[in-house]
Image (spheres, rainbow, N blue to C red):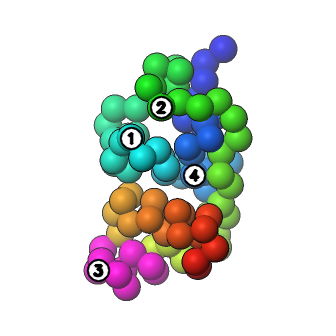
Amino acid sequence: MIYECTDCNNCASFSDGFRIICLSKKYEAEEVFEYQPLGDRNAENCGDFSEGSPQEFDIDIDWPAAEDFSYIKYKEVTYKSIREWCEWKLRGFV
């Protein structure tokens, strides 16, 4: 079976994987797109892959809130700032 990042406990999945953000502390948020396995590559090749269910977020509600957070705090939207918002939401801060 081919495992994708959306099969990982470290995945923040927006609307069933339409957009994903890696929550692994081992990698920068941008690295998931440059290095970590996506698509038809096997996520088990990732050293931090942890099989399981991703953290689910809503693309229509949570993604715009994460973008707003990014604009307000950093004046731009980056994968790093979206990941920061996800981590804050999971801790109950937003």
Secondary structure state at the residue bearing disc 2: loop
Occupied quadrant, residue 60: bottom right
Q: Amino acid at mark 4?
A: Ala
Occupied quadrant, residue 69: bottom left
> Which mark sits nearer the N-terminus, 3 or 2?
2
Q: Which mark is residue 75?
A: 3
Instruction: Classify 10 Å Cα crowding around label 4: few (below 14), some (14-19), many (20 and above).
Output: many
Instruction: Classify 10 Å Cα crowding around label 1: few (below 14), some (14-19), many (20 and above).
Output: few
Residue 92 can be seen, yes or no: yes
How many angstroms separate mark 1 from mark 3 (CA)?
Answer: 26 Å
Q: Is residue 69 magenta?
A: yes
Secondary structure state at the residue bearing disc 4: strand
Q: Which residues are magenta?
A: 68-76
User: In this picture, is 42 found above or below 94?
Assistant: above
Secondary structure state at the residue bearing disc 1: loop
Query: Would you name the residue on which mark 1 appears?
Result: 26
Q: Which-is-in-front pick, marks 4 and 3? A: 4
**Residue sitting at 53 percent across and 30 percent down?**
49
Query: Would you name the residue on which mark 2 appears?
Result: 48
Query: Would you name the residue on which mark 4 appears?
Result: 12
**Residue sitting at 39 percent across and 75 percent down?**
70
Instruction: Classify 10 Å Cα crowding around label 3: few (below 14), some (14-19), many (20 and above).
Output: few
User: In this picture, is 44 found above or below 9?
Assistant: above
Q: Amino acid at mark 1?
A: Lys
Task: Quarter of the image for the C terminus: give it.
Answer: bottom right
Q: Residue 14 in the image: x percent, y percent?
A: 61, 56
Looking at this rendering, what residue extends furthest in the top direction? Answer: 1
